Image (spheres, rainbow, N blue to C red):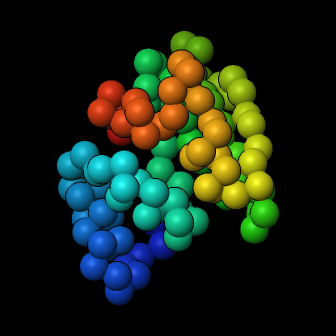
Amino acid sequence: MTFKGRYGNVYIDEAYDKFFNKQKITYEEYVLILAVNDEIDFLYHNKIYQIIHETEKIVSMCIYQFNDKQKMLVKSDSFINIIALLDTYRIDNKRIRDIWEEVSFN
């Protein structure tokens, strides 16, 4: 994850504080962090999911898994913005919001 510091917004700063103190953040807090173009990866069913802000108009969901001890890119899908990704991307036919209680963090 790339950390960009304090934002002066109580909700965003609280989300970062929870994350860096190894507390689970809510889905809404995750979305706030994505909205400021940071990238937090999460684990779900032994795969790592990371949203990457490639350009101002391209956001990608990258999926990694470990082959022995090496992290390997399995799949990458691109979207026009974070809203489109969160609305249409599916993991096991579910939105990220719908699996959030089952995700964990590194």
Q: Where is residue 94 drawn, in percent x and y? A: 51, 27
Residue under the image location 28 percent in, 79 percent down: 10
Which of 93 and 22 lies nearest the eye of the viewer? 93
> In the rendered image of this protein, does residue 70 appear above or below residue 53?
above
Q: Is residue 42 visible?
A: no
- Total residue callouts: 0
Residue 89 image offset from top left, x and y in percent: 63, 36
Kindly identify the residue that appears in the image at 48 percent across and 37 percent down: 96
Q: Residue furthest top?
A: 68
Residue under the point 23% across and 58% down: 18
Residue 1 x, y percent position in the rendering: 49, 54
Using residue 41 as the reference point, say whether residue 81 is left or right of it.
right
Q: Is residue 99 left or right of residue 72?
A: left
Query: What percent of the width, then of the height, locates residue 51?
Result: 60, 47
Q: Nearer the viewer, residue 105 or 99?
A: 99
On the picture, is 61 further left or further right than 40? right
Q: Quadrant of residue 37?
A: bottom right
Q: Is residue 35 visible?
A: yes
Residue at image position (44%, 18%) is 45
Of all residues shown, which one is farthest toward the bottom? 8
Which is nearer the eye, 80 or 36? Answer: 80
